Image (spheres, rainbow, N blue to C red):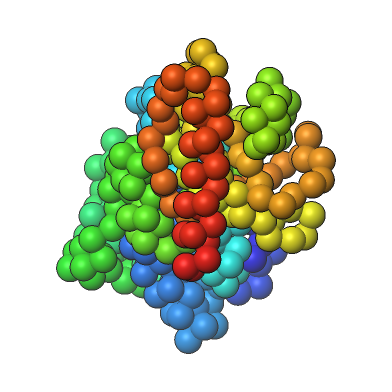
Amino acid sequence: METIQNISLFKDIPNQTIITIGTFDGVHLGHRKILERLINNAKATNLKSTVLTFFPHPRMVLQKDVDIKLLNTLEEKKQIMETLGLDYLIIHPFTKEFSRLTATEFVEDILVDGLKAKKIIIGYDHRFGRNRNANIQDLIAFGNTLGFDVEEIPAQEIDDVSVSSTKIRNALLEGDIETANSYLSYAYMLTGIIGKGKGLGKEFGFPTANLHIEEEYKLIPKTGVYVVKSTLEGKEYFGMMNIGFNPTVDGTTKSIEVNFFDFDGDLYGKKVQVNILHRIRAEHKFNSVEELKQQLQKDRVRSLELISNK
């Protein structure tokens, strides 16, 4: 898969393309239905499978929705898309100026002239152009005039999956990681740089790596203790992660701390991706540090039980 950061850089492509358009936050099961259809169509017609997506998220630009939380960072989305067998992923900068393109300008300048679209696969409710005033019937009319086909994914086919990014966000915010993962078809991930903490975990016998996530828009699941898995220095490690405020030691700021089982390396300053498998309990304020240490031992035993049952 080739990733292209701007439509204007999509040049000298020998084949015409088959395109789908969307934000694809989470690249979940519902999205995959569309993407599988795109890729299969591309193979059958000798067209290049192409996804057109945008960053920042349109709501961040048009509604100044600074509180919107997304399931994937841009890098995570690229990583997931890479596994699907696409030819091109185009991530176009979304700006107010871009949003003001008329439907005609979007179709003629972007889809046909810019991306060489021969076929477009799109969901039944897709809207486009300035003020989102054009729909799939308009797109079909453009295709008849400009020489590209439009394939509509009917409502029933998408709704049959009963998956949406909103449902996944809600599950994560409720701590229901198993439901979220089943909708995503992969383990929800957090990607960040390991920084230094207060070193309290080491004193308890549970040294932790503090995960700092730069992207403020990334959705962090509900506070609590989770079973996780990561690949560190080329090897797979399991562990447990606490998302919360460390109330037992009078913590006041939210942190993400991971204790990797049987790992003895130095992760400071490195980028680490943590895949979340289970939530085992809520965060509690214990009466003493000793009581917290006893609970952490129980958490470790429970984590190992869940890991062994996978």
Residue nearer the viewer, 231 or 52: 231
Residue at x-position 47% and y-position 59%: 306
Q: Residue furthest left?
A: 156
Give the percent coordinates (x, y) of residue 45: 48, 84
Give the percent coordinates (x, y) of residue 11: 67, 58
Residue nearer the viewer, 190 or 258: 258
* Position above or below: 10 against 294: below
Q: Residue furthest right?
A: 266
* Position above or below: 43 against 101: below
Residue at x-position 37% and y-position 61%: 182
Residue nearer the viewer, 148 or 63: 63
Q: Quadrant of the N terminus?
A: bottom right
Q: Is residue 125 visible?
A: yes
Q: Is residue 102 visible?
A: no
* Left or right relative to 30: residue 274: right
Residue at x-position 60% and y-position 74%: 15
Residue nearer the viewer, 43 or 136: 43
* Position above or below: 47 against 237: below
Residue at x-position 49% and y-position 36%: 295
The image shows a total of numbered marks equal to 0
Give the percent coordinates (x, y) of residue 211: 63, 34
* Left or right relative to 158: residue 268: right
